[in-house]
Each structure stands twice: as C-alpha cells, then as structure tokens.
Amino acid sequence: MKSLMIQGTSSGAGKTTLVTALCRIFSKKGYRVAPFKSQNMSNYSYKTKEFEISRAQAIQAVAARTEITPDINPILLKPLGNYRSSVFLHGKFYKNMHAAEYYQKFALTKGLAAATHSLNKLHRLNDFVIIEGAGSPSEINLTKYDIANMRIAEKANSPVLLVTDIDRGGSFASIIGTMALLDKKYRHFVKGFVINKFRGDLDILKPAFQKLKKKTGRPVLGTIPMAKFALPEEDSLGVKAKHMVWNKKNLKKINSEIEKLSKLVEKNLNIKEIERMIR
C-alpha cells in the first residue's frame, strides 16, 4: 500500500490544509489520489441523500479530483454536548454515544475495523492515499484508544510528516515532545517535519532546523508561510466555522482557493522528497 500521512503536534496545526494541498499537487502530477481520515469530529458535514461525512474530507476529495464517498471518512462524530456525540459509520447514522462508550466499546472494535476496510478499499482504487491524522499522536491519555493516528500509519505502513503551527509558538518544543512521547514502535514512521504559518525571515529560523535534526534525526521538509485562504474551516479552537451550500458557485470558489493553496505549498515544501517517500 502506498500512502502518506500528515499528523500534527496539536489540533489546528494545519493537517487538513496540508492534505488538501497535497491532494491537488499529486493529482496535477497525474496520480490517482484520495484523501482519508478515519475519524473526524465536526458539526460541519457534507450530506447527500445516501450518506453524511466530514466537510473537510469532501473538500479534500475535490482537491484530489476524485469521487466523494463515505470511505474517505468512515467515522464522523457530531458533538451533542455533555461528552456525547452522534456517531456516523460509513456515512450512516449508527447511534448516539457517550465518550466512555465510544472509546471502551467501539473504537478498537467496530471503529477500527470500519477504518481499515475503507482504507484498504481506497488503496485498491488509487495510486496512493493521503491520510490525515487527528489532534496529536501523543495524547497519552487517549493513545490506548487512538484509531486516527499511529495505528492507521501502521496499518498502511505509511511515512508520516509531522506538522506544527509556529504562529502559536512552542513549535520546536512541541515537535521534540511529540517524538519523545510516541511509543518507540511508532517513531520510525515519522520521516520529517513541516513548519506551518511562519511569519518573518526564514534565514533566522534555519539554524534551529539543524538543532532539531540533531535531537530527532529527522529533517524539516518545508516551511509554509502564513497565508489566508477562503476555504471552509473546521469548528475548532479559535475558529468559528460557517455552514456552506454545495452549489456550483461555491465549488468554483473552493477550487480556485485550492489552486492558490497548492501552489504556495508546492513552492515551500520538498515535494520531490515526499514523492520519493511514497514510492
């Protein structure tokens, strides 16, 4: 199986945006590529008469120029409050669950089986799959039940790029801390780092890359400058997402923004090295 996985040092690091850009970049290179996120928590969805999945993965499918199907987001959690969520499985409502029930009775059984089934199906239909993680792979209180990060990287035998938001500060500490807290059996999957939302002089930042490589053994594969794009965002920390209508006018705008985003990322990321990893 050929895959690339994007994980983050935190929520809001830029995983969704980076996967969107990479889907378009590799689609333009002639690859059949599909996005994938095993589990997404969001109240903003893409809904048809047949199924409902996360809006973010639907937009990534637009970027990849591939069909929007339930397999690109086999588990959608729509928060209800008080630690409860509506669980959608393969695009269909499954049941409402408390977080404790989800983690202890669903995640590692039916949830992981559903995610693995969809991931395998996408691999059969595409040249490779670009996988998005969730939150951080080093949330040590949740690692036991995590079916969105390193368990998926292991299932796909996928190289992982770790992205961090330098605009919020503490990026280098976050990278080193994430690597230190990862189970040893998972560390080898991480092949490099991406610095996201950078403002300032890159020459001033570069000396830190050498120190980071000495401490982790991995290189920084790109620094993405801070930029704003008119793409619908997830509902997360510091973001008040808006609903959107899936009509031709809005899809045209989204496609235009994806093009701008992909050009910025391609210019500032070592795409050749990433392509080599996937092969």
Image (cartoon, rainbow, N blue to C red):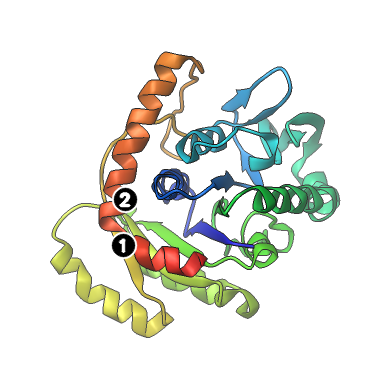
Indicate the quadrant containing the N terminus: top left, top right, bottom left or bottom right. bottom right
Snapshot quadrant of residue 108: bottom right
Mark 1: few, some, or many residues within 10 Å (few <14, many ≥20)?
some
Residue 36 lies, with reference to residue 202, above or below; the image says: above
Q: Identify the amino acid type marked 1.
A: Gly
Horizontal and vertical percent position of residue 161 = 46, 63
Q: Is residue 174 visible?
A: no
Horizontal and vertical percent position of residue 268 = 27, 56
Q: CA distance from mark 1 to mark 2?
A: 9 Å
**Residue pushed farthest bottom?**
214
Q: Is residue 272 left or right of residue 122?
A: left
Residue 162 lies, with reference to residue 244, above or below; the image says: below
Residue 106 lies, with reference to residue 260, above or below; the image says: below
Which residue corresponds to mark 1? Answer: 222
Horizontal and vertical percent position of residue 163 = 42, 59
Q: Residue at x 34, y 44 (%)?
A: 262
Q: Residue at x 33, y 52 (%)?
A: 168
> How many callouts does the rendering have?
2
Which residue corresponds to mark 2? Answer: 265
Q: Which mark is on residue 166? A: none
Residues at marks 1 and 2 touching, judged by CB atoms closer than 8 Å: yes
Q: Nearer the viewer, residue 254 or 195?
A: 254
Snapshot quadrant of residue 2: bottom right
Q: Secondary structure at mark 1?
A: strand
Q: Identify the amino acid type marked 2.
A: Val
Q: Is residue 69 left or right of residue 261?
A: right
Q: Residue at x 48, y 55 (%)?
A: 10
Q: Is residue 26 visible?
A: yes
Q: Is residue 266 left or right of residue 245?
A: left
Q: Earlier in the sequence, mark 1 or mark 2?
A: 1
